[in-house]
Structure formats: C-alpha cells, structure tokens
Amino acid sequence: MSTIRTHKTRKVMTGLALAAVISLPLAACSSTDDSDSGSSSDSNSVAEPVARINALSGVDTGILLDAGFAEALTTLGLTPGTVGTATLADGSINFPITGGNVTYFEPGTAKPYVIGQVQHEGSGLSLTAGDTVVELTNFNVDPGISRVYGDVSVNGETVVTSAFLFQLRGATLKPLQTEGDTAILEGTKVFISPVAAGLLNETFGTDAVTDQLLVGVAKITVNTTPAA
C-alpha cells in the first residue's frame, strides 16, 4: 500500500469522503423537489412567514433509514458508525442541532417555503473500509436550496470542508407540526448527490450507487424558543 496508497489515498479520501455521502443519513427539511443552485437567502419579499426562529437552540435532525440504504452499504463493504454526539437507535440516526435559523412560509405563498441554515456542530457519521476511516461531521442543512453540506476527514486528516453531500426532495414534506415548545418538519426524502454517486462507483468499482438511492426520510425537531 505504498505507491498506491499515496496516490490513491487522496482519491479514496475524496471518494470515500463523498462516498460517505451514501451512508450519511443526515436530515433535512427541504421545501423544494429539486436541487437548485440558488442561495437560501433569496427569501420571498411579499409573503409573510408563518414562523421564524432567528437563533436555533436544538433539538435534533433525524433520519429514518431506508432498507435499500443498508443493502447499499453491504454491497460497498462499508461499516457505519457515529461520531461525537450523534446517536443511532431504532433504525434512525440523530444529530443534535447546535445553531442556525429557520423561516417557514405557508406552502404555496413562497418558493422555497422553508429557508435558513440548520447546523450540527460536533456530531457526524463514520465509515470504515479496511484500515481507512472516513468521518463526516458538522452538517449544515440548507433547506432553501435542498442541500446538505459537511466536513470530511480521512484517518483523522481533514480532506474537505463544506462539501455538498446530499440532495433533498421535499414533495413529501408534511405541514409544520408543533408539540409544546418544539416545531417539527417531517417527510423530506434524502438522496445522495449525483456527483457523490459517481465518485462512489469509481472508488469502489461498482455501479450500485445512483442519485436515485434513497438514504431515508428526515425529521427535524427544533426548539421554538430562540437561543439566548
């Protein structure tokens, strides 16, 4: 693993890193059905928001994993794990929300109707293949452009920051729910990005990964009381 490891490690870093995408059951509350490249700061100037939280203080983003996702991991020979404060239980992986902001409009009055940033510092997902360990951490959900970004490291070394990891499709997003001091956005489907799918296939010598691979269904629960 000398020459190949030097030249190939970086490819495995990028590949596995974005490869990790497939096993990154990160969450999202996308409000659109595509992955437009615009900025979530392009909020609608006419519609009045139903709810706005300028400083998120929790609680978490969870993904109910799809059965096909587990099959894909087996095919690729990847063993998943959690990093930091992330937890895995009852078929869902959860990442505590540590900051950000969210504005929610009545569906149909603005597009996108969920904008903001949902940050998850200090948690993430690991993927192990042989003696290579990839960690995806510090996820940032941008619902306005239907994307999830994150940092990637391989064997403890940072490879890339703020990489585009997931695309979100929110046609199945349910109406905003409230429970006590929390608001819940549930139903968005999480898929790997087309770029990540290509890198995964090239890195692992497979054609099993496509941008149609469903990672799972997201559920974001936030405190309606802003952070102090």
Image (cartoon, rainbow, N blue to C red):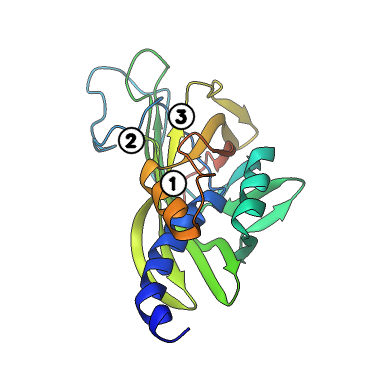
| Residue 191 coordinates in the image, percent (x, y) | 49, 38
Q: Is residue 95 visible?
A: yes
Q: Which residue is mark 1?
A: 197
Q: Earlier in the sequence, mark 2 or mark 1?
A: 2
Image check: 120 left or right of 95?
left
Image depth: mark 2 or mark 3 in front? 3
Identify which residue is drawn at 53% across, 31% down: 188
Instruction: Give the mark nearest the N terminus, 2 or 3.
Output: 2
Examine the image and state in which quarter residue 91 appears: top right
- Dot 2 corresponds to which residue? 145
Residue at position x 58%, y 64% in the image: 127
| Residue identified by numbered label 3 | 169
Helix or strand or loop: what does disc 2 sit on?
Answer: loop
Q: Please tell me whether mark 1 or mark 3 is closer to you in this view.
A: 1
Q: Is residue 31 above or below residue 182?
A: above
The kind of secondary structure element at disc 1 is helix
Residue 40, label in figure? none
Q: Residue at x 54, y 44 (%)?
A: 208
> Which amino acid lies under the numbered mark 3 shown in the image of this protein?
Arg
- Residue drawn at 46 percent across, 73 percent down: 154
Viewed as shown, does residue 13 lie left or right of 222?
Answer: left
Which mark is first along the chain, 3 or 1?
Answer: 3
Amino acid at dot 1: Ala
Q: Is residue 66 visible?
A: no
Q: Quadrant of the C terminus?
A: bottom left
Q: Nearer the viewer, residue 219 or 79?
A: 79
Give x and y (percent) for residue 3. Answer: 38, 84
Crowd rating for badge 1 (residues with CA inside 10 Å; few <14, some 14–19, many 20+) = many
Amino acid type at image mark 2: Ile
